[in-house]
Image: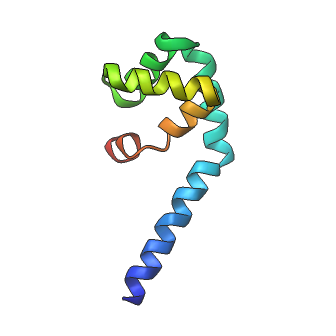
Amino acid sequence: LRRQRQMCIRDRLQALNLLNSKFIMQQAGRMAQSVGPGREGISKVYQVLYGRPATGEEVEDAVTFVEEHGMVSFCRAMLNTNEFLFVF
């Protein structure tokens, strides 16, 4: 039980470190600049990070997120998804 708890805490700390790391923040800014704004930029992020096109629902959700938080925050979130981290 103690080992499981230590692993759980370690995993959460690693996730927080990745989310808040200076490197990820820099890369998110660079990605946001390179893909451009709007739906086209969102589609490019999916293609670059996941190697696949975004679904219609993913684009709609992303548009809402980008309108509220900006493209840099969207790229930062995408760089921290399980689909990106554990596939590539």
Is residue 26 toward the left or the right of residue 1 in the image?
Answer: right
Q: Is residue 9 something that shows in the picture? A: yes
Q: Residue at x 33, y 19 (%)?
A: 56
Instruction: Decide: is 10 above or below 43.
Output: below
Q: Residue at x 57, y 52 (%)?
A: 18
Q: Residue at x 51, y 65 (%)?
A: 12
Expressed as whole percent of the image width and height from the top left, the position of residue 35 reads: 54, 16
Foreground: 63 or 18? 63
Instruction: Pick the quarter of the image with the C terminus.
Output: top left
Expressed as whole percent of the image width and height from the top left, the position of residue 64 reads: 52, 25
Q: Is residue 54 something that shows in the picture? A: no
Foreground: 55 or 53? 55
Is residue 75 toward the left or the right of residue 83 in the image?
Answer: right
Instruction: Decide: is 75 above or below 22.
Output: above
Instruction: Decide: is 78 above or below 54.
Output: below
Is residue 41 toward the left or the right of residue 30 in the image?
Answer: left
Q: Residue at x 35, y 47 (%)?
A: 86
Expressed as whole percent of the image width and height from the top left, the position of residue 24 reads: 60, 41
Is residue 33 toward the left or the right of residue 49 in the image?
Answer: right
Query: Which of the 4 image quadrants contains residue 26?
Result: top right
